[in-house]
Amino acid sequence: MAGPASDELAGAVAIVTGAAGGVGRATVELLSARGACVVAEDLNPTVAELEDERVAFLLRPTVETTDDDWDGLLRVNVRGAFLHRREAIRALS
């Protein structure tokens, strides 16, 4: 159950992987109910069931993924994580 609806997370954006079931699905539902906009990611096509005014889903088979799509994923998920860590280490040093 998502819990009581509120706007305590209004303006926040969350990305949830493994969103089609279990803990991932519950996390999407909770964040959305609390006012966050959520990007739900999963290879399972049932992730589309979560789509509403606050939840968008991502699902694309590998054979339909373009080089630009792949480069974008790497920029966000790999390069973004590296840059974040590097700046955190600098700030903590």
Image (tube, rainbow, N blue to C red):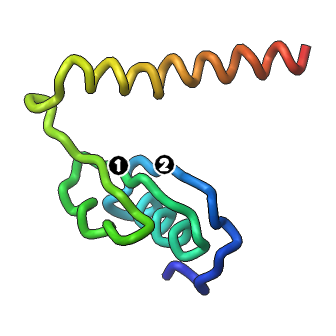
Task: Please name the residue that numbered disc 1 is placed on.
Answer: 41
Q: Residue most toward the bottom?
A: 4
Q: Which mark is residue 70?
A: none
Q: Which of 72 and 41 is in front in this view?
A: 72
Image coords of residue 20 (percent x, y): 31, 60
Mark 2 vs mark 1: which is more N-terminal?
2
Q: Residues within 10 Å of mark 1 (few under 14, many from 20)?
A: many
In the picture, measured across the screen, residue 58 lies left or right of residue 28, that is left
Q: Are marks 2 and 1 in contact (CB under 8 Å)?
A: yes
- Secondary structure beneath dot 1 equals strand
Q: Nearer the viewer, residue 17 or 75?
A: 75
User: Residue at (66%, 23%) from the top-left corner?
Assistant: 84
In the picture, measured across the screen, residue 57 lies left or right of residue 2, that is left
Image coords of residue 72 (percent x, y): 36, 24
User: Residue at (65%, 75%) from the top-left corner?
Assistant: 7
Q: Residues within 10 Å of mark 2 (few under 14, many from 20)?
A: some
The residue type indicated by label 1 comes to Glu
The residue type indicated by label 2 comes to Ile
Quadrant where the C terminus is found in the figure: top right
Q: Nearer the viewer, residue 64 or 30?
A: 64
Task: Please name the residue that numbered disc 2 is placed on.
Answer: 15
Query: Distance from label 2 to label 1 (Cα)?
Result: 7 Å
